Image (spheres, coloured by chain):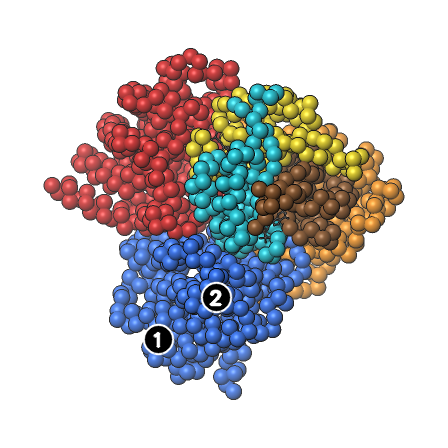
Chain colours: A orange, B brown, C yellow, D red, E cyan, F blue
């Protein structure tokens, strides 16, 4: 009961977070058919900035805390989650949709959403809850395994002639999955932050820290516009897939909270780990799936992760997961 | 005017932006050395709307224009057909005259 | 080569960017399901220079490319003519072959 | 006499404002045929930023001051001015130009220029004169009424066959006027600022406040380039319309100062109200007019408001209006 | 349909972006009043790759589309040839019908 | 010996500068064939910002120090270096490449790279070494003379028929060289900074100062991508030109250090002067050469300055030049 009250309070306080409100504003602009638009190059600038800043900040923190065995265990758990989630998702999905769509959606939900992670970091900062820099590394490590697992599943379960084996190369795929732009930038910035002296880090700090919340707000306005434009495609997805887009994050969150508890993560780190597991990709995975499983309907997996799972996570998920973690960890 | 103009074929290709790089490599392999590209193009077709408003190049097309000899057309279209089959897109061939310079 | 190419009409439209959305809706109403759009195009015509350098989409054009059957051309141009009359612009029709895939 | 000296000093100090100097630099670049250019997506980023920041700051201030009856009266006055100005402008303009051009220009001068408003806010801040957050709401409310009044005038006074009634829909027009991108973003940011807690607002403040003047300077450089490119078209406008572009702002300013005095506005608020009335639109109105009165010559109204009225207001208008207000309010 | 369409020539030009301004001035001098421009276009040709990824307009092309009377073609191509010779690029001429409005 | 140790330490500390590391990251992204990409409009925004900020800061400093005779002598030396370097380069280059390529490369190395200069300013700031605002003016003055000298050399030594005299106009060329976008923005911002009051300058300072290092880091990431994409073209350049791209900067640096010593410049100013002389253009000169010597192979001079000289200067040059200056000035 008390838990429930706390939860509602958290939910409300999250709803009144400017960044979240700007996300609503973006969605509203689409629904009101406003001509508000953000050029694609600006979206790219903001996402480059956010990835660089979150990576750099994480690296600086990691430089202070050092790399311990515990950290490596958490990173391993992160990679495993990203590899296992697609498997169970795939077998659920096969019950009601085609193999190629199933594999693509499974990969989508095994991978992560950097924007959700970044919003979670801001959410924690607003509540003065500390989190660790190495969680950024966990995020980077979770982007790609799901792509590879998704493709293995697809190759195992789809009929032969669909595969057109000639034009396919595993080595190319793995390189693309691991060196995709956002993974590269996050890992690079993390390492640079790690190697930077305090003085250098301080000279970057207005850029990487003070500006962060403002850019995130503008970026979530953009995400609201992008997600809002996808709402129309929800009817194509159908009830089952929409339910999937809410339930799978919840299941993943429960598993993640359980693991966090086992690994004895701090509350902040547990939230970030949970959010990573609960989030779904709409940048790296769609690009990879489009090229490697072109038969899959891109509109389906993009819409599910962008128009359902993303809003769910940043609006309801964040406070819900935090409340649960606080309750479990008591 | 005959001696300053040369009849050529004009090939227009619409292809998924994600596949542009590999498509150009393919074309270069078939011996195409001249082409012009418009990177950001959007559109609608059998495989749905490609509105170009995602955070990366997913759901976006690119446009390739090639002026070539009639004899080269078959080689080019043969190289393109499997790509178009796989990723969707469009290829138009028309006639034009090339201004010699 | 005959059996892999299909003769089509190639319609090119230049229209005020502000009217692009409504123009595409109009085209979809007449049954056009395949088109390609280049959003930012500038130009000069009877109604002055459209230099695309304002803070919004005023004074900018968009380019639409449609490959369609000859039989569809009239319907499309009929739908376009009032728009071109009202907002200015251009529509060109030419011949091309569509690569079947 | 002393007034005049003060005025000259104000004028000089305004001329030495970096933002205003960057505007000159932009114009100069065009006149010197420099290849200095700012990509359109960057212009959009800066205007998005400025609208978001001004809206958010206004909302935060409004949250502190609360909404009072006086505020509502001022907002009402703002809407009325935006609706009445086009009417008298239209009847002046009809004397020497066509109905469609007249209606479009009338709407242009009834509406407002957000950049002029933002420059005025920075001008006041530089002089340590306080202004109120609700003036941002006034700005948002003044964008659209003029569009609708302009169109009513056009429909009443143009010949029947020019109207091509079929393709016209009032409801669509009103929706477009009220939900246009900049109105939407300003109002949205205002509400978000209003709802934000102090802590959240503080975490955005480097972005929304400290960066403001710098971005405004870069943006005015861009405005200088854009306005400069329009200077060539002034010859098409002719002497009468150029005179109109200076005199109407002055008349509107006089009326606005009178109303401000009646409403007992503070000096800062009076200046903002005056600047809103004296400014002319070159974003929202041109887009609306181009679609609803395509016969009107867009080059005319864009050039008048962008290449004459805008520079006049930010260079001479601001110090002139302020000196007058200070003199009147004594 | 004959009376609503007018046969025209369709001229496509690829030119170095740095030379676009002067090229349009040249065209206007020869009497061309209608044209459409796509500013950012990349490509490959005899003079190497123009990838459009520098910090300014070096190594980038622009695309110009002109619909004109057959009689104007020679004047336009004559004006263009020295430019193409000097800076590289391409000019294609083809047939089209212009929709009267 | 001690000198050598100091040098290595400086080199290492420069390598661990985040901005330099981001440059490496960009190059690495290209080598790893990552799809990391920065839209061109974003590159333009960042370079506009950096030029504006460096110009404005320089102007503000110049306003404090005032313009003295010594400054004018230094500026004169800068212009002379920019005019003389192309001459000796040209006669070296003629020995092994064509006249048009030689002239274009000579102009490239006589002119300067603003990004190298800006990186040097950040490098000095990180080491708490002061430099003067007027060096920004030196930078601006050095951009154009080399272009004109390069062209004079070309006209003198190329065969007649190659010249196609008709389409060439000196006045147009000189205007374009002097009013090119970056020169215009630097000089303009310098003057604006010079004229600004301390209060106005302070209100811009988060934008022009605090943000600087962060934007530079993101910009160098972009430069790394751009330079990395040019690495492939190095094989076309051949060993001799690659050696040229390293040796000429070194020679120019030696001359510059000698002059700095004669002029009695402070250590910081000497470094900036040296870096200007040692750097090569890849923005203004390529654009000018492409239009005025189109026969020259643009890939050659762009690749040399961008993929060899630029990285050499910011990675090895900066610490090397500084160590030498400190040693000479002892
Ligand atoms: N009939 C057409 N006319 C013009 N463009 C087309 C047409 N059909 C397809 N396209 C373009 O090709 C892309 C992929 O088409 P599709 O594979 O049919 O979905 C579309 O997004 C359009 O940009
Ligand atoms: N002859 C032409 N050739 C190419 N494009 C044209 C031509 N005429 C008009 N346009 C394009 O159509 C737009 C509107 O033309 P207009 O309505 O004649 O002002 C222009 O801005 C050009 O982009
Ligand atoms: N055969 C071609 N087909 C299409 N575009 C071409 C062709 N040849 C050249 N171009 C375009 O013209 C530009 C300059 O060509 P070039 O002068 O041959 O280097 C190239 O960068 C391409 O954009
Ligand atoms: Na996940
Ligand atoms: Na007004
Ligand atoms: Na130099």
Q: Position of residue E94 (x, y in %)?
A: 61, 37
Secondary element at tag 1? loop
- Rendered image quadrant of residue F144: bottom left
Residue for point 56% across, 39% down: E11
What is the chain letter for disc 2? F
Residue for point 32% across, 23% down: D97
- Rendered image quadrant of residue B10: top right
Q: Position of residue D162 (x, y in %)?
A: 43, 16
- Rendered image quadrant of residue F136: bottom left
Q: Nearer the viewer, residue C46 or F128?
A: C46
Crowding at dot 1, Cα within 10 Å, few <14 / some 14-19 / many 20+, comes out as many
Quadrant the C terminus of chain F occupies? bottom left
What is the chain letter for disc 1? F
Q: Is mark 1 within 8 Å of ligand 6?
A: no
Above or below for D60 versus A256: above
- Return the residue at label 2: F159
Above or below for A62 versus A273: below
Q: Is residue D85 left or right of residue F251?
A: left
Residue for point 74% across, 37% down: C99
- Return the residue at label 1: F265
Q: Position of residue A220 (x, y in %)?
A: 55, 41
Marked residue nearer the N-terminal end (1 or 2): 2
Q: Is residue C93 something that shows in the picture? A: yes
Residue mark closest to the camera, 1 vs 2: 2
Q: Nearer the viewer, residue B95 or D120?
A: B95
Give the farthest residue toward the bottom: F1
Q: Is residue A214 left or right of residue F269?
A: right
Give the farthest residue toward the right: A160
Does the CB distance between marks 1 and 2 fall below 8 Å?
A: no
Q: Position of residue B65 (x, y in %)?
A: 64, 44
């Amino acid at each position: 009961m008390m838990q429930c009250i706390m939860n509602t309070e958290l939910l409300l306080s999250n709803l009144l977070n400017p960044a979240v409100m700007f996300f609503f504003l973006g969605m509203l602009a689409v629904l009101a058919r406003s001509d508000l638009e953000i050029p694609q190059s600006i979206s790219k600038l903001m996402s480059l900035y956010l990835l660089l800043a979150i990576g750099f900040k994480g690296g600086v923190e990691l430089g202070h805390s050092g790399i311990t065995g515990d950290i490596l265990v958490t990173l391993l758990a992160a990679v495993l989650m990203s590899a296992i989630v697609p498997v169970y998702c795939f077998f659920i999905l096969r019950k009601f949709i085609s193999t190629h769509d199933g594999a693509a959606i499974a990969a989508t939900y095994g991978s992560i959403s950097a924007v959700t992670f970044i919003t979670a970091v801001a959410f924690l900062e607003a509540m003065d809850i500390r989190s660790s820099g190495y969680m950024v590394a966990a995020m980077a490590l979770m982007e790609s395994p799901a792509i590879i697992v998704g493709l293995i599943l697809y190759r195992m379960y789809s009929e032969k002639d669909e595969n057109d084996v000639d034009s396919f190369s595993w080595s190319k795929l793995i390189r693309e999955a691991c060196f995709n732009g956002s993974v590269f930038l996050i890992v690079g910035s993390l390492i640079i932050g790690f190697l930077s002296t305090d003085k250098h880090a301080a000279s970057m700090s207005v850029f990487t820290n003070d500006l962060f919340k403002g850019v995130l707000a503008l970026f979530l306005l953009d995400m609201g516009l992008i997600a809002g434009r996808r709402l129309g495609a929800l009817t194509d997805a159908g009830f089952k897939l929409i339910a999937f887009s809410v339930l799978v994050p919840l299941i993943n969150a429960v598993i993640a909270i359980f693991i966090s508890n086992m690994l004895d993560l701090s509350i902040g780190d547990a939230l970030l780990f949970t959010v990573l597991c609960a989030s779904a990709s709409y940048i790296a995975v769609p690009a990879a799936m489009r090229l490697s499983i072109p038969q899959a309907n891109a509109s389906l997996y993009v819409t599910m992760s962008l128009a359902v799972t993303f809003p769910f996570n940043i609006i309801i998920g964040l406070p819900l997961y935090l409340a649960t973690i606080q309750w479990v960890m008591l | 005017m005959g001696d300053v103009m040369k009849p050529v074929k004009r090939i227009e290709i619409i292809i998924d932006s994600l596949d542009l790089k590999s498509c150009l490599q393919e074309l270069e392999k078939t011996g195409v050395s001249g082409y012009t590209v418009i990177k950001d193009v959007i559109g609608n077709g059998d495989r749905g709307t490609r509105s170009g408003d995602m955070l990366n190049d997913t759901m976006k097309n690119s446009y390739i224009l090639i002026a070539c000899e009639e004899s080269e057309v078959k080689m080019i279209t043969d190289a393109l057909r499997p790509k178009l089959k796989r990723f969707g897109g469009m290829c138009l061939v028309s006639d034009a005259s090339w201004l010699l310079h």
